[in-house]
Amino acid sequence: MDQLADGQDPAGPGQRWVTGIDHAGITVASLDRSLAFYRDLLGLRVIEISGPEGEDVGEAIGVRGARIRAADLDAGDGRIIELLEYVRAAAGPVVQQPNAPGCPHVALRVPDLAGLLRRLAAAGHEPAGRPVTITGALAWEGATVVYLRDPDGALIELIQRPGPETTAGRPG
């Protein structure tokens, strides 16, 4: 936590600077193609599609003249995945390796990992590795995880936690 020169916390003792994750954003080459993946294959509900947004977006991100189309998707439990297509000032693709420092991923909780992997494979999307069930890590005990890439190469982790899940995606 940042501290003043005299060692005092500027927000006061015990102040939390971050109170939660608002959303996860993924830059995509084609919003329509990505919606076919996230909405149609993974089943995430579209909350809103907007754009192209004005150039103030470019000011906020430090890319002058950028304009975007965006889709907010309901990832469950009040969490949002935001898909961003740059319609002006787009950069070329960068595909990071999962072991590269700074490489982000989005983890999606799923109730039936094997079934979803069959659905994805039928549509031509194979996982990067094989599903592994974690043991010996208290917070992850019994969770089965696997990574795959979305149509633009973004890393997506699919995770099935042990126990039943409700339709809201929360443990039952």
Image (tube, rainbow, N blue to C red):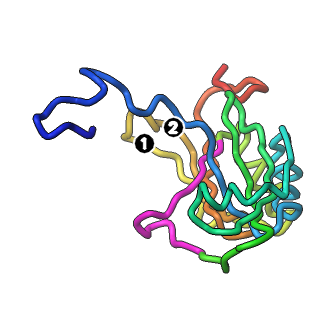
Q: Quadrant of the C terminus?
A: top right
Residue 2 lies in quadrant: top left
Q: How many numbered discs?
A: 2
Q: Residue furthest bottom?
A: 92
Residue 99 sits inside the magenta stretch: yes
Given residues 88 and 28, the one toward you in this image is 88
Position in image of residue 99 (x %, y %) = 44, 67
Q: Residues within 10 Å of mark 1 (few under 14, many from 20)?
A: few
Over which residues does the magenta segment extend? 95-108
Position in image of residue 31 (x %, y %) = 83, 61
The mark nearer the N terminus, 2 or 1, is 1
Residue 30 lies in quadrant: bottom right
On the picture, is 126 further left or further right than 4?
right
Helix, strand or loop at label 1? It is loop
Q: Residues within 10 Å of mark 2 (few under 14, many from 20)?
A: some
Query: Which residue lies at the image location 86% right of the left edge and 64% below the top edge?
Result: 33
Helix, strand or loop at label 2? It is loop
Query: Which residue lies at the image location 52% right of the left edge and 47% below the top edge?
Result: 133
Query: Which residue lies at the image location 71% right of the left edge and 73% below the top edge?
Result: 89
| Residue labelled with disc 2 | 142
Q: CA distance from mark 2 to mark 1?
A: 6 Å
On the picture, is 154 further left or further right than 123?
left
Q: Quadrant of the N terminus?
A: top left
**Disc 2, disc 1: CB below 8 Å?**
yes
| Residue labelled with disc 1 | 135
Query: Which residue lies at the image location 47% right of the left edge and 45% below the top edge?
Result: 134
On the picture, is 42 further left or further right than 160?
right
Position in image of residue 162 (x %, y %) = 58, 32
Residue 80 sits inside the magenta stretch: no
The amino acid at mark 1 is: Thr
Position in image of residue 69 (x %, y %) = 81, 57
The amino acid at mark 2 is: Gly
